[in-house]
Image: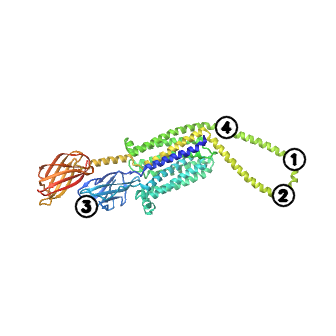
Amino acid sequence: MTQTIAPRVRTLVLLLLAAACALLAGAGPASAHAALTGSDPREGAVVDKAPAQVSLTFSESVSMDDDSLRVLDPKGKRVDDGKPSGTGGTTYSVKLHAGLPDGTYTVTYQVVSADSHPVSGAYTFSVGAPSETSVTVSGQGAGGGFVGGLYGVGRYVSYAGFAVLVGGAAFVLACWPRGSGVRVVQRFVVSGWLSLTAATLLLLLLRGSYTGSGKVADVFDLGLLGEVLQTKAGAALVSRLLLLAAAALFIAVLFGAYDKREDEEKRDLTFGLAVGGSVVAVGLAATWAMSEHASVGLQAALAMPVDVVHLIAVATWLGGLTALLVALYRGPADTPVPALAVSRFSRVAFGSVTALVVTGTYQSWRQLGSWTAFTDTRYGQLLLVKIGLVAVLVGVAYFSRRWTAQLAEATPAVARAAAARRAEKEEKGAGKASTKASGNASAKTGAKAGTKASGNAKVAEKGSGTAKGTGGSQRAAQLARQRAAVDAARQKRQRDADPNRFGLRRSVLAEAGIAVVLLVVTTVLTQTEPGRTEEEAKAAGTSSAGSSAPATGAVTLDMPFDTGSQNGKGVVRVELDPARVGANDLHLYVERPDGTAFDIPEVKVALTQKAKDIGPLPVAPDHITTGHWSASGVQIPMAGDWEVAVTVRTSDIDQVTISKNTQIG
């Protein structure tokens, strides 16, 4: 049975790596954690005259530089002054050049949200009437590309390294103090420290390019690195590196002075290491809590310490579980993991799961805000997957606890049998030694005389005897090593033949496999827009679309005209109320340049939606009074961007058609 363990382990590891890669590949670039909830001018709007500035409102505060908010004319030339400013809380604006001509303008933004994630997007508005534009923003997207993918890998490795470092050290201190002298356990914890350190350095180098251009060349821009160090995320990464230096000292003591102490002497040092290690672990966890989700939004002062507890609970559980797995599969045969250590870890894991449930419930409420967000948002869907994985993991852990109990019950009997075998072996060895000693004594008496006679011969052969002795010692050392290897292999077979230990190894391996996938899902969650923010953005988008008309509930369009004849100049004002799909009231006013109303021989209106090839839909308004025409029940069949064309005739031969676009519905 034990011969099939190694192939199964390799197969499971490959499957787990494949699952992890698939989840990471599907994660894509980091989602925006600050959503655009409003703009002025709004998306798709057609304004009569060029605005003095463009304002954007986000769901949370963001950071930006001179290139974060840009406004481009139809030819792609910047028409803003390049100095965005905050006008209050979450609203930011940039001033535009004076005297902008009519046409379609493109607004692009690329900022960093308060929880350190890049946010980008673009939209258009028009002055006077829409026009063709050469601006292309299809490639706009922060946090993507090769740099974005590499940054995502760095985030995953940093979380995994933190779990291995904290969980492995906690497993040694709280569950198996003798494990500090086991080489595979030492390598496991050190690998966690190395992974976390390397990933932190990588994230620090990638940060500037990740939130900016996304170019690989910018990774080595020292000026950009200096800017990163002045941000909240950069300060968190530097603090993490400093704390990792303290963690290196902790590891040196744990596997150095602590390992060399006797069991009684370890107790005093254990307390000091536990306090120091806890401080370092809390500090490392705080570098995430103070720079990501927990640091912004609802109840941030409470959310950050809750997030620290959550991260440490995850690391203690998953990291300790992996350390146990490594010790069970790769530990030396002469130092097996005792049942007492497994029982202790079972209690530690139970406490960690309890902390996870409490803190996770609070975090779910804070990030989702409603039950519907579980199914209607990507964050909620991923959270359901995480909850399901935790439930499966707890179920597998139940079987591990059963194997642990059976192993603890069987340990005394196994120990007594082993002691009996050792005593029997020692007794047989003592008998053989006694027999050999008496035989040697008899031979020594008979050969005493012959010893003198052969003395000279021994002196003569001394040189050759020395050479033989050297060869014999090398041979003896080689035989000793072979016997030691055979004994170790035999002890390993005896250890693995224990059905309780074998069952425990399989269940712990299953737990570790699920834990790998769980860690990947957790990492993707940290890069996903919280459900509460996503729903707020959707509500703001719906509200924005619903409030595309002015507060009066009508669209008003002013269109100057000039037919070229005497008294052929004026302004046509068209009011469409409520500017929604279905029946609408249309009012049309004609005024002279000085603002006085006057009549003209004829006026006609037509509505066209070119995107859907609808129209023109003719409207024949009735004359009401001087300079005023009206039509009721004007049907708008579909929401969208509609062209309103007005034909004005000021004499029998002088007429002109003018038009403007507006968003309806």
| 572 to the left or right of 523 | left
- The residue positioned 52% from the left and 56% from the top of the image is 245
- Along the polypeptide, which appears first: circle 3 or circle 2? 3
Label 3 belongs to which residue?
101
Q: Measure how far apart labels 2 and 4 are at the Cα level.
A: 54 Å
Q: Amino acid at mark 3?
A: Pro
Image coordinates for residue 29, horizontal then vertical, percent: 41, 52
The image quadrant where one finds the N terminus is top right
Label 4 belongs to which residue?
417
Q: Amino acid at mark 1?
A: Gly
Q: Residues within 10 Å of mark 2 (few under 14, many from 20)?
A: few
Q: Residues within 10 Å of mark 4 (few under 14, many from 20)?
A: few
Q: Is residue 360 above or below residue 242?
A: above
Instruction: Please state which of the two labelled residues, at mark 3 or mark 4, is closer to the viewer.
Output: 3
Of residues 553 and 482, the one drawn nearer to the viewer in this rendering? 482
Label 2 belongs to which residue?
460
- Along the polypeptide, which appears first: circle 1 or circle 2? 1
* SS class, disc 2: helix
* SS class, disc 1: helix
